[in-house]
């Protein structure tokens, strides 16, 4: 577990560097000569939080690594785990073209159901959870923030 935590911490730090570099290209928000939190604020905040959490994982893993040998570490990757990761990557790659084909609501419902089923959630529970997830996302973004989602051949 220590090695996994170390890799997780390093991954968080790498993601935060990417977010920081990408977010630095966002414009400043200046109103009447006053610099206010603008589009850069949230990515920078997330980036700082990711660095803090990643550093915590790296430091605790290295401290525990010094106390014990890494030879007793459990197997890091399994065939089933690798297959799940590849399936998720493929699913995410197919998700965007799929929602362009059938619309956001149906695409998200199908995507969430398939992903949950891959991770071993029973089909009825995955259908229910996917429906709840889709409804919550639609309520928040379409009804509260008034952001329309892509719709295709079905009117909902």
Image (cartoon, rainbow, N blue to C red):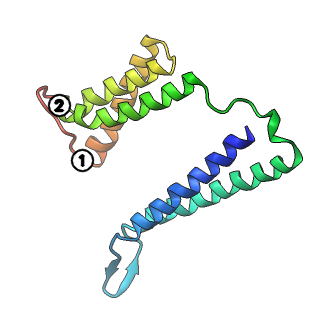
Residue under the image location 11 percent in, 27 percent down: 153
Secondary structure at badge 2 equals: helix
Q: Quadrant of residue 51?
A: bottom right
Image quadrant for the N terminus? Answer: top right
Q: Classify the position of the C terminus by image quarter.
A: top left
Q: How crowded is mark 2: few (under 14 residues within 10 Å), some or many (20 or more)?
A: some
Q: Residue 58 placed where, x, y %?
A: 70, 53
Q: Position of residue 106 (x, y in %)?
A: 25, 26
Q: Check contact, mark 1 vs mark 2: CB within 8 A.
A: no
Query: Marks 1 and 2: which is nearer the front?
Result: 2
Q: Give above or below for 4 relative to 49.
A: above
Kindly indicate the quadrant of the structure image that contains residue 88: top left
Q: Earlier in the sequence, mark 1 or mark 2?
A: 2
Q: Mark 1 points at which residue?
A: 147
Callout 1 secondary element: loop
- In the rendered image, which residue does mark 2 sit on? 101
Report the front residue among 133 and 52.
Answer: 52
Which residue is most to the right? 67
């Amino acid at each position: 577990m220590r090695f996994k935590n170390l890799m997780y911490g390093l991954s968080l730090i790498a993601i935060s560097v990417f977010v920081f570099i990408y977010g630095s290209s966002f414009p400043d928000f200046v109103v009447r000569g006053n610099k206010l939190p603008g589009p850069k604020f949230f990515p920078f905040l997330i980036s700082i939080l990711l660095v803090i959490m990643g550093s915590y994982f790296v430091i605790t893993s290295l401290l525990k690594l010094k106390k014990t040998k890494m030879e007793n570490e459990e197997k890091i990757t399994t065939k089933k785990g690798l297959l799940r990761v590849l399936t998720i990557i493929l699913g995410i790659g197919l998700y965007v073209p799929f929602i362009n084909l059938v619309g956001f609501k149906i695409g998200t419902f199908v995507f969430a159901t398939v992903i949950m089923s891959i991770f071993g959630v029973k089909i009825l529970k995955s259908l229910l959870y996917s429906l709840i997830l889709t409804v919550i996302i639609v309520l928040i973004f379409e009804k509260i923030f008034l952001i329309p989602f892509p719709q295709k051949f079905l009117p909902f």
